[in-house]
Image (tube, rainbow, N blue to C red):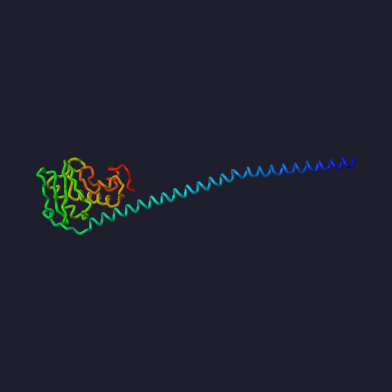
Amino acid sequence: MKKKIISAVILACLLTACGNNVTKNDVTESSAKTEVPSVAEKKSSAESIAESVAESIQEEAESSYAENIEDIVEEMNEEAEEEKGLLTSAEDIHLTDVDGWETNYSFEYGGETYSAVYTPDNWKIIDSYKITCEADMIIICGTLADIHPVHGSDGESYRTPEDMAYEWVQHNIAYDILPDDNSWKANAKDVDINPADQNKSLYEMYKSKTGGSLS
């Protein structure tokens, strides 16, 4: 009888112990399951913060780049305006009608010979990027306009030597700052003065030529 009682007590103890173990495991598993969403939430929160920081850095970089471009463009416009010229009059460039067809012309500047091609309402100067003084550009443009004037953007007025030279300067700046693989860089080296680009800034011309944004 005592053995049965002892056995029953031992069995009860074992069952109780087993029950306690199951409960402990259940609690542990339950706790683990509860912690998983918490870790996921923390990870999600960390990723969200990282994305916000990355976006902020990107915005600051883009803003800084745009400001740098604006500073460079402004500085180069000022340099062209302030540069001392080589020319004193239209006669200095010795403009010549090369073939007598009033289309292909040549002129002299700084010891080099340049080509200027006229088509209706358009003057194209080959390798114009080499000439960087705005005062000299005005004289050259005035000489070209005296032979074949170019209409203004309104289709009625005519381009002035000053606004033609301004367009030339914008082309020069584009040629200087654009990377070699940019689609407009090759075109920027040869200014083409036409009605459409009258008084346009570099940013406006770039957008009209490429559809993109310079900054």
* Residue in front for this viewpoint, 195 or 97: 97
Rendered location of residue 203, percent (x, y): 29, 47
Front residue of this view, candidates 201 and 129: 129
When asked about the image quadrant of residue 79, the answer is bottom left
Question: Could you say where residue 139 lies in the image, as x and y percent from the top left?
Answer: 16, 53
Residue sitting at the far bottom: 84
Q: Is residue 57 left or right of residue 3?
A: left
Q: Quadrant of the N terminus?
A: top right
Q: Residue furthest left?
A: 100
Residue at image position (22%, 55%) is 132
Left or right of 118, for residue 62: right
Q: Position of residue 57 (x, y in %)?
A: 43, 51
Q: Residue at x 40, y 51 (%)?
A: 61
| 86 or 165: nearer the viewer | 86
Q: Residue at x 34, y 54 (%)?
A: 68
Q: Is residue 56 left or right of residue 11?
A: left
Q: Residue at x 27, y 55 (%)?
A: 76
On the image, which quarter does residue 151 sit in? top left
Looking at this view, name the residue that lies furthest to the right. 1
Q: How many marks?
A: 0
